[in-house]
Amino acid sequence: MKVTFKIWRYDPAKDVKPYFQDYTFDVKEGMTVLDCLYYIKENIDATLAFRASCRMGICGSCAMYINKKPRLACETQALSLGTDVIEIAPLPNYKNIKDLVPDLTPLFEKHKNVKPYIIPENEQEFINPTGEYSQTPAELEEYLQFAYCIKCGACLAACPTVGTTPDFPGPQALAQAYRYNADNRDFGEKERKVQVDNPKGLWRCHMAGACAEACPKGVDPALAIQLFKRSFFFTGRKPKARLIPLNKEKPARGGIKAPEPTV
Amino acid sequence: MSESKLWFLFIVAALILLVFLGIHLGYMHLDNILGVNDPLDYNNVKTRGQDTFWLVSYLILLVAALYHGMYGLRTILLEYFPQNLKFINGLIGIIGFLALILGSYVVIYSYIGG
């Protein structure tokens, strides 16, 4: 089927403002939008710039605005969009570096600000571990959904609040803050709350829910934000993760061996 | 006051509004069902204004509605002018305070028989 791709072109070195360029070719069944972009780059126009890496919905590099929705190009089947004109632009709410490449620096800065890592109760235990933490499946479930974030930035592109308030941390950072707060190995809840409890922080979310719809991994940042808000007023006691002492005994002779290398 | 506390009060004000606005609307518009004799009649309005229950209800309704509305307005203004936090806080504070004084004056003046 012949499909026309209307692709956003912008080279700050030579263009005054962005414009759309059309590319028309036969798209075969099974081709993703990313495959089509590679086809254009390899066969029609080598100057087209876009970002992609894993081609399997894991790295999040190829998030772009396809037919006016933030999607991963590698996960979007070109023909399943059901249109013979496919419009592709860089993610909105970010500075455009070139063609389809957005500047994701604000995403990572906001992510870093909410301390997206486990803050231990006892720092020494993390430096010189005496054991390993165990979690029950129920404790894992508390945060597992939110741990699937691949930092593609699609949620920030969909968020109307980020559009009007660039300093708003956005759904990605807030969902990650909640992800670590909900983890029972973590003790950094107070530090993260201080980071987001300000006039441009958590409370500016007006529950449009667009982030949840845009997320290609089903993380549902909108839910995380509501749970985060609730945690300010209804703080349930978080069970501490159990520390299981390391077994420092040497393995008995003839015990379990590492598997033999195979040819 | 921290932003979380302001937001919490905004939600509390909404709950108060649900109750007191419900009483107000019920009394005014379900008059036939509740057997109230013409709630908009001048004498009835005057009698209601001089009743302590209605005085307290109207003051609570006034404070809750003003806080809820002003917080909402502040949110909208902050969305349009995110860099003007101090000015917006001041503006909202002054408008809210003036409206509170004016509203309280009307309710209290009616109560003392003005």
Image (tube, rainbow, N blue to C red):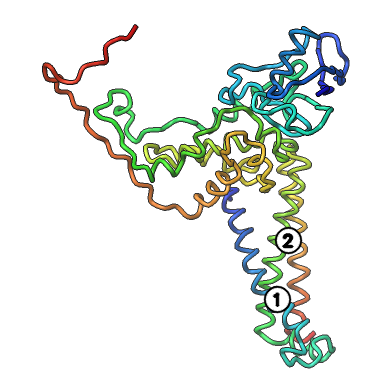
Residue depicted at x 43% and y 37%: A188
Which residue is label 2 attached to?
Answer: B97
What residue lies at 81% left-to-right and 24% top-to-bottom?
Answer: A1
Q: CA distance from mark 2 to mark 1?
A: 16 Å
Q: Which of the pair A55/A17 is nearer the observer? A: A55
User: Is A140 on the left-hand or right-hand side of B71?
Assistant: left
B33 to A168, vertically: above or below: below
Residue drawn 71% across the image and 36% down it: A158
Label disc, if present, on residue B58 of the rendered structure: 1
Total tally of numbered discs in the picture: 2
Q: Secondary structure at mark 2?
A: helix
Residues marked 2 and 1 touching at CB (< 8 Å): no
Q: Earlier in the sequence, mark 2 or mark 1?
A: 1
The quadrant holding residue A198 is top right
Percent position of residue A66, x then y: 75, 29
Residue B111, quarter of the rendered image: bottom right
Q: Position of residue A227 (x, y in %)?
A: 53, 48
Determine whether A52 is above or below A175 in the image. Answer: above
Q: Nearer the viewer, residue A206 or A250?
A: A250
Q: Is residue A261 left or right of residue B85?
A: left
Disc 2 is attached to a residue of which chain? B
Amino acid type for the residue under numbered disc 2: Phe
* Front one among A123 and B32: B32
Q: Position of residue A93 (x, y in %)?
A: 73, 30
Q: Is residue A245 left or right of residue B40?
A: left
Above or below residue A44? Residue A137 is below
The kind of residue tagged 1 is Tyr
Q: Quadrant of residue A262?
A: top left
Q: Quadrant of the C terminus of chain A?
A: top left
